[in-house]
């Protein structure tokens, strides 16, 4: 059964009569919000809950252990919420088995990145009445603006229109980024309620985000010298690898969407002009170059590899910096060879 993301909050009590959820898509911030809605509901209804988390790779390596976590009882709780991260079609048989046996005391929340229409996992959850499928697409500029306004309203903080636009533009279509920056604004404001644009620029990580955004653009364009220069600066200030991977994911997703529309338009310029969210004029030359470098197959491969690298970074933090930056370097070199 397909449920739109905005319907989750108002239908939560009915939705949770089911115990298998698939939450997929590129909007990680939205997926996080949905997970919080589900968990908070259960905490209000029953504080005696056990939360478990695992990854697809761990399940495939030891299926018996996973089944035990589902079907074995607990001495300390009467309800389990188990999350599976990085799910793909490799899990289809296991999920079908669970669906057939219907464990009553377990809620299974499965997270996946983008799943194509032909995905077996996606089809299973869409067609079954006893399962919930929630696609999480990237936030539109209007959605991000409303999120920012609502968060600021809680502290009675007012920002000029230019400052709101800046927050949206620098969010990389990720509501988590906006929320993080607003927390900084709240700390700065304290008792002050009306802030100016120059203050917002000084508060948010303007230069850091600019460098991060530039790094990924140079990476996808194959500009090795500029890429290495920015990379060395970010490396020294301990950049957040997960944040960089999400920027890469967002930009690659956008290129993929444009590539898929090429056959329906007369020119790349026409597609870019009509793209939503709107592509700002400063980015148009960069995107045109990236589109000339990458084909559909390679873009899909990058998206798949991003998911694997992100999982590795989370499971082995000590290797995250090396793994992520090696991955970016490999992409940049490949783009340079194509261009």
Image: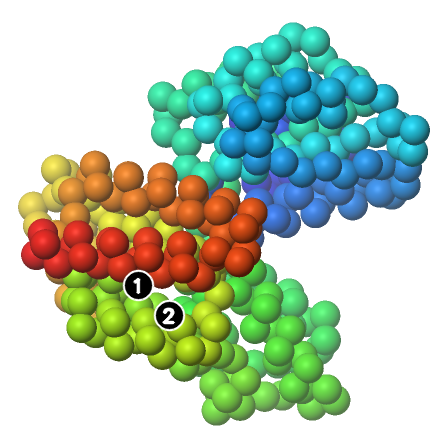
Q: Residue furthest top?
A: 100
Read off the residue under disc 2.
Answer: 212
Q: Quadrant of the N terminus?
A: top right
- Location of residue 277 by image quarter: bottom left
Is residue 339 at least partly visible in the picture? yes
Question: In the drawing, what numbered circle is on residue 44?
Answer: none
The residue that appears at 60% across and 33% down in the rendered structure is 84
The image shows residue 191 at horizontal and vertical percentages of 74, 89
Proximity of marks 1 and 2: CB atoms separated by less than 8 Å: yes
Vertical placement of residue 146 versus 81, above or below: below
The residue that appears at 46% across and 22% down in the rendered structure is 90
The image shows residue 119 at horizontal and vertical percentages of 40, 23
**Secondary structure of the residue carrying numbered label 1:** helix
Vertical placement of residue 230 versus 90, above or below: below
- Location of residue 213 by image quarter: bottom left
- Report whether 81 appears left or right of 262: right
- Report whether 80 appears left or right of 323: right
| Colour scheme shown | rainbow
The residue that appears at 40% across and 54% down in the rendered structure is 323
Choose between 139 and 119: the one closer to the eye. 119
CA–CA distance in space, label 1 to label 2: 7 Å
Q: Quadrant of the C terminus?
A: bottom left
Choose between 88 and 270: the one closer to the eye. 88
- Report whether 59 appears left or right of 312: right
Circle 1 crowding by C-alpha within 10 Å: few under 14, some 14–19, many from 20: many
Vertical placement of residue 99 versus 5, above or below: above
Read off the residue under disc 1.
Answer: 216
The image shows residue 19 at horizontal and vertical percentages of 71, 24
**Secondary structure of the residue carrying numbered label 2:** helix
Circle 2 crowding by C-alpha within 10 Å: few under 14, some 14–19, many from 20: many
Choose between 315 and 269: the one closer to the eye. 315
């Amino acid at each position: 059964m397909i449920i739109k993301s905005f319907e989750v909050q108002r239908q939560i009590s009915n939705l949770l009569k089911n115990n298998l959820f698939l939450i997929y898509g590129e909007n990680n911030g939205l997926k996080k919000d949905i997970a919080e809605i589900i968990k908070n509901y259960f905490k209000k209804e029953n504080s005696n809950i056990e939360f478990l988390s695992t990854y697809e790779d761990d399940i495939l390596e030891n299926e018996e252990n996973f089944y035990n976590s589902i079907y074995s009882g607990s001495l300390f709780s009467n309800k389990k919420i188990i999350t599976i991260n990085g799910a793909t079609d490799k899990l289809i048989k296991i999920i079908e088995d669970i669906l057939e046996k219907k464990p009553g005391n377990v809620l299974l929340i499965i997270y996946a990145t983008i799943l194509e229409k032909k995905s077996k996992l996606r089809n299973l959850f869409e067609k079954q009445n006893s399962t919930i499928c929630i696609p999480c697409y990237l936030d539109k500029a209007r959605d991000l603006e409303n999120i920012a306004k609502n968060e600021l309203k809680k502290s009675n903080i007012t920002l000029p229109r230019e400052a709101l636009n800046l927050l949206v533009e620098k969010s990389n279509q990720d509501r988590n980024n906006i929320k993080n920056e607003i927390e900084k604004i709240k700390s700065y404001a304290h008792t002050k309620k009306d802030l100016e644009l120059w203050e917002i620029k000084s508060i948010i990580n303007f230069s850091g985000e600019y460098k991060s955004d530039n790094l990924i653009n140079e990476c996808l364009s194959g500009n090795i010298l500029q890429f290495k220069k920015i990379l060395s600066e970010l490396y020294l200030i301990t950049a957040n690898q997960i944040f960089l991977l999400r920027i890469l994911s967002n930009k690659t997703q956008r290129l993929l969407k444009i590539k898929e529309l090429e056959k329906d338009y007369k020119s790349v310029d026409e597609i870019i002009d009509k793209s939503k969210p709107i592509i700002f004029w400063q980015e148009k030359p960069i995107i045109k170059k990236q589109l000339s470098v990458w084909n559909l197959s390679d873009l899909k491969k990058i998206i798949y590899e991003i998911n694997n690298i992100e999982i590795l970074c989370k499971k082995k933090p000590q290797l995250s910096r090396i793994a992520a930056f090696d991955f970016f370097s490999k992409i940049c070199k490949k783009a340079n060879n194509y261009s």
